[in-house]
Structures are given as C-alpha cells and as structure tokens.
C-alpha cells in the first residue's frame, strides 16, 4: 500500500480534481460547440458563394452552347448558294454577345472558307489544329479548346463544332467561335477569397486553363486531383482552404474555388485560448481557496502530529499552545494529548530504567551460559602433562589459562576493550593448540585501531570453539585465522578455517536456528547472536560463508559508532 495522503492534501485534492474535471469538460464542450457552429456557418457561406460563382460560369458556358445550337439550326437549312446570308446573322450574334471575337465556318471536306462575320478574317493553315480535328472526329458535341497563351494572341478560348447541311450533305462545315476569355473571367471575378484564395479552371487531364492567381497553382492542382469533384478542406502554403470543385456541363472543363479559412481557424483558436485561460484562472482560484481552507483545518493537527512523532525520542511538549485558528474539537484533542503525555513521560522514565536493568540481566544470563567444560578439559590436560613429566609445558598451559580467566572475569564488566577480547581469543587458541598439538595453527590479524573500541565479551570464543570442533581435519593441519577490521561503517570480527566446511542447506539451517525466537540452550552462534542483538540492536549481525571441503568463515558485524562507546566505563 502507498503512503496515505495528509489531511491537508485530502481536503484540497479531491474537490480540486472534481472542479478541474468539471472546468475541463466545460472548456471542451464549449470550444467544440463553438468550433462546430463557426465552421458550419462559415462553410455554409463559403459553399453558397462558391456555388453561385460556379453557377454563373455554368450559365455562361450554357449560353455559349446555346449560340452554337442556334448556328447549327440555321446552317442546317442554309442553301450553299446563299452562304453569304449568314454574315448578318453572325454580326447580330456578335452584337448581342460582345465577348465573341469572331465567328467563321469552314468546309468540312477541305477546310475551304464558307462564311464569317463582317469584322473578322478567315484562318489559314488550320487543318491540323486541335479545334478542327476534334470537331471532325466527334461530330455531335461542342469542342472547347483552352485559351491561347502565345504572345500577341488575345487571351481567348475556342468553341468548335461540326455542322451538317440538310440541303447538301457535302456542304457540311466546321464552326469556329473565338471568345474573349479575359473579358469573361473579369466580368465574373469572384469576391475576396482571402490570402492565396483563387479560382481555377482546368481540363480533365488537370492541365491548367485559367487561374485568378499566377503562382503556386501546381500544389492546388495536386489537392484537386484527390478531390475530383465536391468539397473538402486542405492545408496548402501554410494556410487552410475550403475547396469546392465541379465539372461544367458540355465543356469537359472543371472549375474549382479555393477560399482561405484561416480567419475561421483563428477565431476558433482565440475563443479556445480565452476559454482555457478563464478555466485555468477559475481552477487556480478554487485551488487557492481550498488550500487556505485545508491549511486552517490541518495546521493544528499537523502541529499535534509533529509532537506525537517526537514521543519515541521523549522529546515532546506536555502542554501545547493552540492559536485561535483551531476548532473546538481540536482544542479538546490538544488538552487530552497534553494530559496523556504528562502521564506517559512519568511512566516512560520508570520503564526505561526497568528495561536497562532487564537488558543487563539478559546479557549476564547469556554470558553465564558459556559452559565451564573447557576449564575441566584444560585441567585434565595439565594433570596429564605433569604425569608425563612435561612440567614446562604444563606451566605454559597454566599461565595461558590464568590469563584467559582473568580476562573473562573483566572486573564484572560485560563490555570490554577489543584488544582484551582478542587477547582472550589468543590465549584460548594457545591452550587448545597445546592440547591438540600439531592439529592446527592460528593467526590473529588486526587492521583497525583497537585503542578506542569496545565489544561485548565472550563473542569470539564460542565461534573459535565451533571451528575447532567441526573444522579440524584428521591427519591434516588446519589453519585458523581471527581478523578484526572496519568495513562500511561496521566493525567486523571474523573467524576462518580451511577445514571441512558445510553444505548450503546446513548453513541455512544454522542461520535459521540462530535467528529463531525459539529457546536455544546450547552455547554457540545463537548465544553470541542473542547477546549482540540485546546490546547493539538490529544493526548487529552474524554471517556465514562456507563451502564444502573448502572451509568456513563466520563474520560478526557491529556498528562502529556503537563500538566506540563503553556504557559501563573502565
């Protein structure tokens, strides 16, 4: 489980979250509705304008087709001998339709001129031109040809058509009408389409016929290729555009209008920004108000909590001052807490004294569990040496035994200098070596300043005894090394042997028994571990590193700072 939130955070957090979600929903809903309405209205207006412009062009080109149909009907009943009668007819058409530049007829069989209006001249060398060839190849439609872009030639488009003659079929003709395209597009120029907005006329092959702007038309045509006909929005030239395209009946051409709609996007952005800023302001005000309320409610409780957290170290105030900000319930709580702390302080003093005496009693009891069998065995060895006439060896053993027990008594102290504990271990090993002769040898290695370090006494002997009992190899010399060193803020005392070692399962069993809360009456790891924990707490530990047939190392770890203090004095 995660750490619970404080009262202040709880009081301010959830209302702020709920209010923020409400404001967020309000912002999203309002901006969405506004965006939809603005886009819908703007697109409807742009679409209506585009449809009107396209309808104007559709009407114009339909009227061009109507002129073509009128000439078709008139020519079908014209006597070849009276072809000159068509000139007044053509002049009337030009007078009615000023954007017509010329009207002329040419015999379909050989291109020979037949008739024209009175103001224009006949074309020559046109038999391979597109308007003539396409009119002959498809005799039932009006052929619209793109405006000429050659220098010196008026900006015009051509409508051509095959004209049959009912009186003399061999007198069939090809009609050619030139329209002033510049006058047409100028007369029907669209309203302001915004930056980069334009009107485009292009063929079915997407070849450009006309553009109201001369630049960057290729990008626009690429967009129109994906659109074909209909409407869509697109981003071109770092702007947003509404594109509307349709095919003009009878011409095969398509007309597209691109209208800049950045203003719509800008309006939506401004509205969204305004709403978001207002939402953030509302959330900020609400959070600020909730923080003030939460502070007023939680500050007295936080002060009380701070004092309660200091109870463990006995550094607390029995009577707390409460300002007027606290509620009646909090005031009552403060009073009850003060009374409780006064009583606890009295009881704690008594309890600590009892605990210290109990700790010392437990430490003495565990140290007294060290079985005196070692003394009996050593005395038996001394007697045997005397019986064998080895008085000098017996004397050395008695001296070592005397020093061993003098250090063990330690004037009744449970905590002794580290150098005394190591000296006691050395005497113990000397005595055992005299008993077991060449079965083992030993060394003591010190890599720490012993002058100011103290340890619980009798912690090395049980571990050395285990090394002798379980580690000595029959017929071989076992090496035992006792070390004292500092590592990672810990004083470490280790006992190593190169004897039999043990399996991993056995090692884990020893560690489990050592740390078990069950009663353990034997002398050894459990006894040493229990005394270390009583005096040094959970920072003290014993670890075992062992491999079968390779030996065992037992390491005692003691906090170095605690080892520098002797609570019992010298």
Image (cartoon, rainbow, N blue to C red):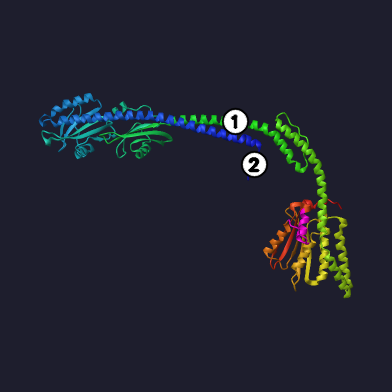
State the image quarter where residue 130 is shown: top left
Q: Give the residue displayed 82% in from the left and 44% down from the top.
A: 350
In this picture, residue 258 sits left or right of residue 299: left
> Where 124 falls versus 442 (above or below)?
above
Question: In this figure, which residue is indicated by the disc labeled 2?
Answer: 4
Label 2 CA crowd tier, 10 Å (few <14, some 14–19, many 20+): few
Helix or strand or loop: what does disc 1 sit on?
helix
Residue 162 within the segment the image draws in magenta: no
Question: In this figure, which residue is indicated by the disc labeled 1?
Answer: 286
- Work out whether residue 482 or residue 151 is closer to the camera in this orientation and state it: 482
Q: Which residues are magenta?
A: 517-533
Q: Give the residue displayed 53% in from the left and 33% down from the top.
A: 24
Question: Is residue 464 at least partly visible in the picture?
Answer: yes
State the image quarter where residue 315 is shown: top right
Question: Is residue 417 at least partly visible in the picture?
Answer: no
> Where 397 falls versus 100 (above or below)?
below
Residue 519 within the segment the image draws in magenta: yes
The residue most toward the bottom is 388
Q: Give the residue displayed 70% in from the left and 35% down from the top.
A: 301
Q: Position of residue 527 (x, y in %)?
A: 78, 59
First in sequence: mark 1 vs mark 2: 2
Q: Give the residue displayed 83% in from the left and 67% down from the top.
A: 431
């Amino acid at each position: 489980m995660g750490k619970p939130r404080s009262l202040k955070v709880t009081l301010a957090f959830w209302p702020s979250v709920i209010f923020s979600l409400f404001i967020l929903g309000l912002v999203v809903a309002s901006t969405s509705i506004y965006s939809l309405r603005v886009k819908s209205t703007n697109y409807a207006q742009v679409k209506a304008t585009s449809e009107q412009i396209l309808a104007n062009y559709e009407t114009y080109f339909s009227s061009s087709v109507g002129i073509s149909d009128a000439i078709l009907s008139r020519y079908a009943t014209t006597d070849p001998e009276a072809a000159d009668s068509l000139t007044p007819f053509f002049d009337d058409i030009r007078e009615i339709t000023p954007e017509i530049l010329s009207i002329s007829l040419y015999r379909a069989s050989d291109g020979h001129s037949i008739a024209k209006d009175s103001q224009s001249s006949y074309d020559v060398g046109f038999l391979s031109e597109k308007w003539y060839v396409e009119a002959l190849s498809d005799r039932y439609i009006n052929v619209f040809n793109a405006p000429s872009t050659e220098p010196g030639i008026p900006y015009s488009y051509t409508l051509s058509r095959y004209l049959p003659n009912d009186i003399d079929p061999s007198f069939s003709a090809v009609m050619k009408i030139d329209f002033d395209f510049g006058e047409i597009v100028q007369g029907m120029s669209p309203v302001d389409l915004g930056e980069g907005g334009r009107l485009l006329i292009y063929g079915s092959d997407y070849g450009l016929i006309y553009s109201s702007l001369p630049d960057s038309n290729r990008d626009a045509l690429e967009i129109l290729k994906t659109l074909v006909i209909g409407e869509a929005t697109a981003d071109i030239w770092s702007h947003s555009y509404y594109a509307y395209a349709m095919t003009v009946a009878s011409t095969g051409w398509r007309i597209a209008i691109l209208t800049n709609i950045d203003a719509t996007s800008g309006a939506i952005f401004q509205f969204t920004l305004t709403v978001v800023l207002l939402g953030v302001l509302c959330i900020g005000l609400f959070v600020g108000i909730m923080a003030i309320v939460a502070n007023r409610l939680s500050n007295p409780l936080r002060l009380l909590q701070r004092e309660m957290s200091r109870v463990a170290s006995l550094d607390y105030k029995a009577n707390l001052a409460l300002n007027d900000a606290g509620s009646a319930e909090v005031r009552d709580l403060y009073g009850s807490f003060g009374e409780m702390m006064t009583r606890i302080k009295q009881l704690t003093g008594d309890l600590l004294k009892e605990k210290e005496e109990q700790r010392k009693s437990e430490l003495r009891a565990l140290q007294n569990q060290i079985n005196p069998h070692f003394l009996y065995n050593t005395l038996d060895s001394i007697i045997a040496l005397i019986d064998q006439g080895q008085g000098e060896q017996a004397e050395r053993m008695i001296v070592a035994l005397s020093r061993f027990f003098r250090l063990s008594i330690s004037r009744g102290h449970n905590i002794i200098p580290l150098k005394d504990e190591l000296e006691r271990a050395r005497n113990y090993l000397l005595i055992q070596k005299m008993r077991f002769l060449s079965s083992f040898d030993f060394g003591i290695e010190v890599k720490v300043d012993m002058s100011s370090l103290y340890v619980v006494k009798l912690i090395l002997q049980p571990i050395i005894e285990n090394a002798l009992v379980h580690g000595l190899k029959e017929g071989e010399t076992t090496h035992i090394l006792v070390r004292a060193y500092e590592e990672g803020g810990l004083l470490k005392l280790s006992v190593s042997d190169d004897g039999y070692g043990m399996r991993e399962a056995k090692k884990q069993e020893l560690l489990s028994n050592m740390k078990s809360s069950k009663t353990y009456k034997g002398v050894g790891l459990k006894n040493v571990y229990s005394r270390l924990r009583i005096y040094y707490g959970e920072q003290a530990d014993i670890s075992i590193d062992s491999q079968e047939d390779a030996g065992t190392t037992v390491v005692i770890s003691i906090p170095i700072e605690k080892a520098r203090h002797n609570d019992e004095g010298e």
